[in-house]
Amino acid sequence: MFDIKKICMIYDMEKEEKMYALKGFDLKLPDKGLIGIIGPSGSGKSTLMYCISTLKKPTEGSIVYNGRELCECSNAQREQLRRSEFGFVFQKHYLVPYMGAVDNVMVAANGKDKELRKRAEDILKELGIGEREFNKKPAKLSGGQCQRVAIARAVINDPKVIFADEPTASLDHENAYNVMKILKEHSKDRLVLVVTHDKSILKDADSVIEMWDGEISVNGEAE
């Protein structure tokens, strides 16, 4: 699905001493499965995910997604790709504070008809959010519930790829386990990329990419 060549991200380009977040490596990613990207702070793992997902454009290199060179796409084309084929889950849920749970899921939906609203409600139910919570605003939901609403928002358009950046970092152990269980289920027929510093949440990953100082140090099956 993704064929990445010589990807390089340089910050502080105008300075004499540049900072290399990604140092020009190659990487291939499959069509489906749960793939972990792990490393300490500053290793480049989040930068890699942002480049793959078109949220950032690398300084150099090539990112081919299903035969399409993402680095050559216009901003409008990248935005359309994110809306139609990509889903996002972040450490902070970024829910709209004045909207209820269902409406927060509908924010990302490609359309606003009754059928899509029914789909949003069905997804929330699958994730353990009951009808009593449908109209509750984020402030009235627990941290785990908010993150599950964020996952529902990420999958509402049935994306081919889900990008999750530290999705469990702000959750307790039980809620972290539940979030990873949900993502693992979706990885059966989608590609799910999980960026984290916590290797313990990747015990069910199909493979783990370990990063260090802007480079891949290990790329193999999860232990």
Image: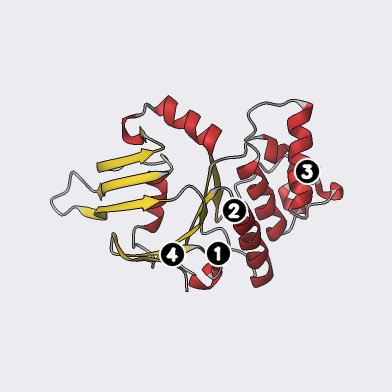
Tell me, yes or no, if residue 44 can be seen here.
yes
The residue at which mark 4 appears reads as: 208
Frontmost of labels 1 and 4 is: 4
Residue at disc 4, secondary structure: strand
The answer to which of 54 and 203 lies nearer the viewer is: 203
Q: Position of residue 19 (x, y in %)?
A: 23, 54
Label 4 CA crowd tier, 10 Å (few <14, some 14–19, many 20+): many
Q: Residue at x 69, y 40 (%)?
A: 104
Q: Quadrant of residue 37?
A: bottom left
The residue at which mark 3 appears reads as: 122
Q: Are marks 4 and 3 in contact (CB under 8 Å)?
A: no
Residue at disc 1, secondary structure: loop
Q: Position of residue 214 (x, y in %)?
A: 28, 59
Residue at disc 2, secondary structure: loop
Tell me, yes or no, if residue 59 can be seen here.
no
The residue at which mark 2 appears reads as: 188
Per the model, the C-alpha gap separating discs 1 and 3 is 26 Å
Q: Amino acid at mark 2?
A: Lys
Residue 122 position (above or below residue 34):
above
Per the model, the C-alpha gap separating discs 2 and 1 is 23 Å
Frontmost of labels 2 and 1 is: 2
Frontmost of labels 2 and 3 is: 2
Position of the N terminus by quadrant: top left
The residue at which mark 1 appears reads as: 169
Frontmost of labels 4 and 2 is: 2
Disc on the earlier residue, 2 or 1: 1
Label 1 CA crowd tier, 10 Å (few <14, some 14–19, many 20+): some
